[in-house]
Image: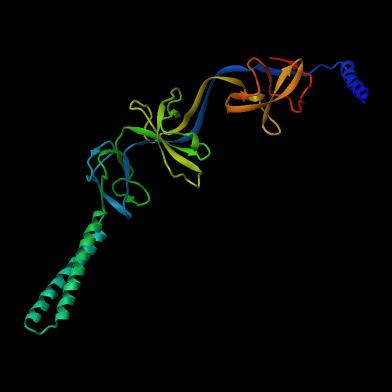
Amino acid sequence: MGLGVAVVAGMAALGWHLSGGTAPQVHTAAVTVGPVVQAVYANGTVEPVTWAQVRPIQAARIVEVAAREGDRVEAGQVLARLDPTDQLATLTSLQANAKFLESELGRQRQLAQRGIAAPQALERAQSQLDQARAQVEAQRQKLENYVLRAPIGGMVLRRDGELGEIARPDAAMYWVGQPSPLWAVVEVDEEDIPLVKVGQRSLIKADAFPDKVPEGTVAQITPKGDPVNKSYRVRIGLPEDTPLRIGMTVEANIIVRTADKVLLVPDTALVSGGEGQVVFVVEGGAARSRPVDVGVVGEKAEIRGGLREGETVITNPPAGLADGAAVRAGG
C-alpha cells in the first residue's frame, strides 16, 4: 500500500511538471516586532460639566426675553416671561371668592355672638375661607411657572425661542451653565465597558478639527447602562485649552492597553480556522497552516502565540489554499 501511495504522489507531481505549470505566487510579509495599542471606540457629544436646561411646565406665548445667549446670569435670575393672562383671570376669580367668604365669616361671627347662628355654621364658614385662601396661594404659585428663571449661575449657552413664539414643555428654551470645564459624553458598548476604567487616556476626533487629535481622560462611568441601546455612558474630561466646543459630535478611542514589543502581522494574513484563526507560513516552498493566538487587530494583528519573529506569512491567501500546497513567495 505504501508503494501505491508513493506512485500516485509521484504521478501527480509528474503530471504538474509535464503540463508546464508552476506553483502559484503569493504575497508575503515578515513577522515583525512593534508596539500595539488597544482602544475602545465610542461616539458622543461635548457638554459642559455644569449645566442645566430650562423649559416651561406648560405651553404659553413668550412675552418677554430677559436674557440672551452669552449673558452671565445668577441663580434665580429671570430669563423670560410667558403670557399669564388666563391664569391671572383665574387668580382674580379666586380672590373675589375668598373676599366673599371672608365677609361671610364675619357675618357668621356676628350671628354667633348674638346667639342666632349655630357653632357648626361658624366652623363651616371658617373652613370654606381657609380653603379659598389656599386656592389663591396655589394659583399665585402657579403664576410663578410663567416666569423662567436660571436654576444655576453661569452663562446662557443657548436660547431657543423668540418674542411671540410659543414655548413648550417638550423643548428646552434655555441652556445655562459654565462654559468650562468641558467633557465628552460618549456611549460605550456593553461588551467593551469592562475594559474601560477611570483615568484612562482617550484620543478624540471631531470633524471640525480633522488635523487635530485632542486628548482627554476618562472621568466618570455611569453605573447603570441603557438596556435598549446596550451601552454605558462614559464622561471623558477635556483639558482647559481644548479646541472642542459645546455640542460638537466626537469620536473617542479610549486607550485600554499599550505594549511596546509584540509580534505583528498584516491583518490580511489571518484566516478563520476550525476552532480559531490561522495563518499560512511559507516553509521550503510550501504553505503551512499555523494556528495562532490573536490579540488586538487593526491594520496589523497582534500575535500572542504560534509564530516567531522573522517568519514569512502569506497575506490574502488564495481561496482553497491547502496546508502543504506548493507556493512561490512574492512581495
Q: Residue at x 51, y 40 (%)?
A: 190
Taking the spot 59% from the left edge, 20% from the top edge, the residue there is 263
Q: Is residue 253 left or right of residue 147?
A: right
Q: Nearer the viewer, residue 120 or 323?
A: 323
Screen quadrant of the N terminus: top right
Residue 171 placed where, x, y %?
37, 48
Would you say 10 lies left or right of 304 here?
A: right
Q: Residue at x 43, y 42 (%)?
A: 223
| Residue 102, x across and y down, in percent | 13, 71
Q: Front-most of 58 and 190?
A: 190
Vertical placement of 95 versus 189: above or below? below
Q: Position of residue 290 (x, y in %)?
A: 70, 24
The image quadrant of residue 105 is bottom left
Numbered marks: total: 0
Q: Is residue 158 visible?
A: no
Q: Position of residue 169 (x, y in %)?
A: 35, 52
Figure check: 308 above or below 100: above
- Quarter of the picture containing the C terminus is top right
Would you say residue 218 is visible in this rendering? yes
Q: Quadrant location of residue 24? A: top right
Q: Which quarter of the picture shows residue 126?
A: bottom left
Q: Residue furthest bottom?
A: 116
**Residue at the limit of the structure toward the left, as seen here:** 114
Task: Tell me the colour scheme of the image.
Answer: rainbow
Q: Is residue 280 left or right of residue 70?
A: right
Q: In the picture shown, does residue 123 fall above or below 268?
A: below
